């Protein structure tokens, strides 16, 4: 039983595969006109209730372009997004499933292709139908040719002779599918070609009644409108006489009328004009018939190339094809020269080299012949004259260039003259393959250098391309006062047409300031450079000092001066300004011409290799004089740029409101009203008495301590701070009191200030201000520091009383 089931399954699969192959092997051909509507059939075979899905594919694509889903009630249509989906829709007549089709509107050329309709049945095998859609392409307009293969452009075919065999071909190419082409005489069809592009009309003999007969070529593509082309048969009789008149000299570009007269032909003959065996367009002629006399008038604009050509009038008779009459007239044309310039020697302009000779020829086609020639050079067309020194010689219509040089490379033109005018030739460019030369303006240059230093020179040359004249090679020499030395290749770099050298200068002997010369030589396959590119090394001057110096935002800015020809760097020296009473009577001018009164030695130095700009945030508070120098390997500038007595975070600035150095903010003032005026007055009186008493007590204590041996100032400061605190029974300061400690001195005072901060740990805020002014004794014999401490204690007590 199992074997029978397997055989049955295999048989069913074979039947399905065979059915698909048979169905797919038959392709339905559908033709459609562009812009029209077409139908792609797909036979459902059975009722739509047996169909699950229906899909359309194009050109082997796996993604369907149109789908109809019958599985869930009414059919659901889906089309691929885009322009095709908007033009396509599926048409289904349930009463006639075999008429189902995919309708496509506004068919375009790109719709053409092989479509496959796939039908998935619920209980039956899947079926596939192939439909080949071909979009009709209209053919080209019909064209008619005679028996010689010449296209008949106008509406007249001929002339032909009576009894002559007639063969006309009508061709319509480019159509798809090929159209039907046929010949008609009236409503009589004379010849037809099915599914082709060419139809020939063959008449063994032309009868007299064929004269003036109109033949029509019809091109009929399927589903499109037919196209028509009409021609008229023209016949002539034997002529008896022909003559051409109107000869004489004519200027080029002017019109001239020529008349050809014939008689004895019935009907009037076919009169053709030829110039050098080339037929002239009949639209340029005018025919007049008067009985047996026929005239053909040719209006011809005479051209330069018509000079010496033969103008022929030929009368032909279709009744006697072997008999024709002709008359010939030779044209005489006057025209200005048509000029050309060419190179005689050598033949190839790309082989011109220096020291060779070249010869240019100016040839002119003119009537009458040219009698004068001139040559021009360059884009501006400068007139070329004889120049024996420059190797230029003008000999009639020849230009001779001897011993070619680079300056001969230019564009050349020539002009020829005659009685009708002149003609200028097209340019001829000469490219002379030459040796390298220094670039314009760089033959002799100057460099600045210092004895024992280094100089850098850059040599630029002009030369033909390496493809024509080979690569460039450079070498350098140093011409000293005694000898000429080659520079090693390791000091030379080459990039294209430029070479750079770095050379160290020797120290000159004695007082001689001559630093020598550098010479640059280049060569290529044409030869060595004739004259070197020279660089004179001049002693560099001392640099100029900077100028326009200002101090802004803790930075010193200046403008650099001239560097003297060498790279420069900038140096800053800061001198501290002392109080006049601490300065001894000594010379007030230093070696730089800067006043030294009140100045100390330089306390700060800095340098900058790029620009004269320095940061001043490392300086201690005080007043300074700044000196800015510029320095090169040659030396330092003779004078510095000076800024005198510039304040840098001084103690005076600390107590100025709004200053960055002010370290003690002003406590807010309490508000008052009129009702408490008397109370405030009493409080102020009490405060005044308390401050006075406190000041006296502090003065007595300080005078007693003056007799003691001198101890460490830091310890003294700590003791005095403890005294100030113990005056209020060791209680901490009020939260609104912010004591300020001013420590006088220089950098050593910073340590003392740090120790003061340790003492003030019990206060909410301890602000330290450093005073770097020189120490001076007070009237009572105390140091400045002690006096400041006294002032501090008094101020502190005043703040407590105010609070």
Image (cartoon, rainbow, N blue to C red):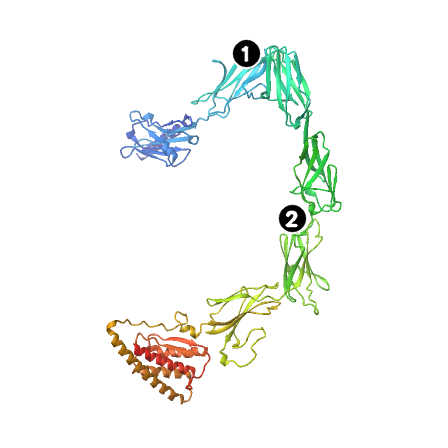
Q: Quadrant of residue 801?
A: bottom left
Q: How many numbered discs?
A: 2
Q: Are marks 1 and 2 in contact (CB under 8 Å)?
A: no
Q: Which mark is residue 466?
A: 2
Q: Secondary structure at mark 1?
A: helix
Q: Residue at x 70, y 43 (%)?
A: 352
Q: Residue at x 54, y 16 (%)?
A: 232
Q: Position of residue 45 (x, y in %)?
A: 32, 26
N-term mark: 1 or 2: 1
- Which quadrant does the C terminus fall into? bottom left
Q: Is residue 487 left or right of residue 708?
A: right
Residue 620 shows in this picture: no
Relative depth, front residue between 359 and 318: 359
Relative depth, front residue between 499 and 248: 248
Mark nearest the camera among 1 and 2 is 1
Which residue carries the number 1 mark? 210
Q: Secondary structure at mark 2?
A: helix
Residue 560 shows in this picture: yes
Q: Is residue 486 left or right of residue 107?
A: right
Q: Is residue 504 left or right of residue 169?
A: right
Rendered view: 577 above or below 382:
below
Q: Residue at x 40, y 35 (%)?
A: 61
């Amino acid at each position: 039983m199992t074997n029978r089931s397997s055989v049955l399954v295999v048989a069913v699969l074979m039947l399905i595969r065979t059915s698909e192959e048979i169905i797919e092997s038959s392709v339905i051909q559908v033709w459609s006109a562009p812009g029209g509507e077409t139908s792609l059939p797909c036979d459902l075979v059975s009722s739509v209730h047996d169909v699950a899905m229906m899909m359309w594919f194009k050109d082997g694509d796996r993604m369907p372009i149109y789908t109809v889903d019958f599985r869930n009630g009414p059919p659901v249509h889906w089309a691929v997004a885009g322009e095709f989906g908007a033009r396509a829709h599926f048409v289904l007549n349930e009463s006639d499933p075999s008429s189902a089709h995919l309708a496509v509107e506004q068919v375009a050329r790109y719709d053409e292709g092989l479509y496959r309709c796939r039908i998935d049945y619920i209980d039956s095998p899947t079926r596939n139908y192939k439909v080949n859609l071909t979009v009709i392409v209209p053919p080209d307009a019909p064209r008619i040719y005679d028996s010689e293969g010449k296209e008949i452009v106008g509406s007249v075919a001929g002339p032909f002779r009576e009894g002559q065999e007639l063969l006309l071909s009508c061709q319509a190419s480019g159509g798809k599918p090929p159209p039907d082409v046929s010949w008609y005489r009236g409503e009589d069809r004379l010849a037809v070609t099915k599914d082709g592009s060419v139809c020939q009309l063959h008449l063994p003999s032309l009868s007299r009644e064929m004269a003036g007969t109109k033949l029509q070529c019809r091109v009929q593509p399927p589903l499109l409108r037919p196209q028509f082309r009409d021609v008229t048969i023209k016949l002539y009789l034997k002529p008896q006489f022909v003559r051409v008149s109107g000869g004489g000299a004519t200027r080029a570009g002017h019109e001239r009328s020529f008349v050809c007269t014939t008689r004895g032909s019935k009907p009037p003959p076919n009169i053709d004009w030829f110039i050098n065996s080339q037929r002239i367009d009949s639209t340029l002629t005018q025919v007049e018939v008067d009985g047996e006399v026929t005239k053909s008038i040719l209006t011809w604009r005479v051209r330069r190339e018509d000079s010496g050509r033969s103008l022929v009038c030929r009368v032909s008779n279709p009744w006697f094809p072997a008999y024709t009459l002709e008359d010939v007239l030779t044209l005489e044309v006057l025209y200005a020269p048509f000029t050309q310039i060419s190179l005689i020697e050598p033949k190839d302009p790309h082989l011109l080299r220096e020291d060779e000779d070249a010869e240019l020829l100016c040839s002119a086609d003119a009537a009458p012949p040219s009698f004068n020639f001139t040559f021009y050079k360059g884009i501006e067309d400068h007139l070329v004259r004889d120049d024996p020194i420059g190797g230029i010689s003008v000999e009639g219509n020849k230009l001779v260039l001897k011993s070619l040089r680079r300056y001969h490379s230019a564009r050349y033109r020539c002009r020829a003259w005659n009685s009708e005018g002149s003609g200028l030739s097209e340019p001829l460019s000469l490219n002379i393959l030459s040796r390298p030369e220094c670039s314009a303006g760089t033959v002799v240059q100057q460099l600045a250098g210092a004895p024992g230093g280094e100089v850098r020179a850059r040599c630029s040359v002009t030369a033909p391309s390496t493809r024509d004249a080979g690569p460039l090679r450079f070498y350098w020499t140093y011409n000293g006062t005694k000898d000429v030395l080659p520079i090693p290749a390791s000091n030379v770099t080459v990039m294209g047409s430029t070479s750079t050298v770095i050379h160290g200068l020797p120290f000159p002997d004695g007082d001689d300031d001559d630093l020598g010369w550098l010479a640059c030589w280049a060569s290529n396959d044409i030869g060595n450079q004739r004259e070197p590119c020279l660089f004179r090394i001049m002693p560099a001057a001392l640099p100029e000092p900077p100028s326009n110096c200002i101090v802004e935002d803790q930075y010193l800015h200046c403008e650099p001066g001239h560097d003297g020809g060498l790279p420069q760097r900038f140096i800053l020296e800061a001198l501290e300004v002392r109080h006049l009473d601490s300065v001894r009577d000594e010379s007030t001018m230093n070696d730089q011409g800067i006043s030294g009164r009140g100045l100390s030695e330089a306390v700060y130095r800095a340098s900058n290799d790029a620009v004269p700009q320095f940061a001043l945030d490392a300086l201690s508070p005080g007043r300074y004089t700044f000196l800015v120098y510029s320095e090169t390997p040659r030396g330092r500038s003779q004078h510095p740029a000076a800024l005198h007595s510039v304040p840098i975070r001084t103690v005076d600035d600390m107590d100025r409101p709004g200053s960055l150095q002010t370290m003690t903010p002003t406590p807010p003032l309490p508000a008052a009203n009129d009702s408490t005026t008397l109370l405030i007055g009493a409080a102020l009186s009490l405060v005044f008495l308390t401050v006075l008493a406190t000041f006296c007590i502090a003065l007595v204590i300080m005078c007693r301590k003056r007799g003691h041996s001198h101890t460490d100032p830091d310890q003294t400061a700590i003791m005095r701070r403890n005294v100030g605190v113990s005056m209020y029974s060791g209680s901490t300061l009020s939260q609104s009191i912010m004591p300020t400690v001013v420590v006088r001195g220089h950098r050593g005072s910073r340590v003392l200030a740090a120790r003061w901060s340790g003492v003030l740990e019990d206060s909410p805020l301890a602000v330290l201000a450093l005073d770097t002014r020189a120490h001076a004794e007070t009237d009572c014999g105390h140091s400045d520091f002690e006096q400041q401490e006294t002032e501090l204690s008094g101020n502190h007590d005043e703040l407590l009383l105010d609070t």
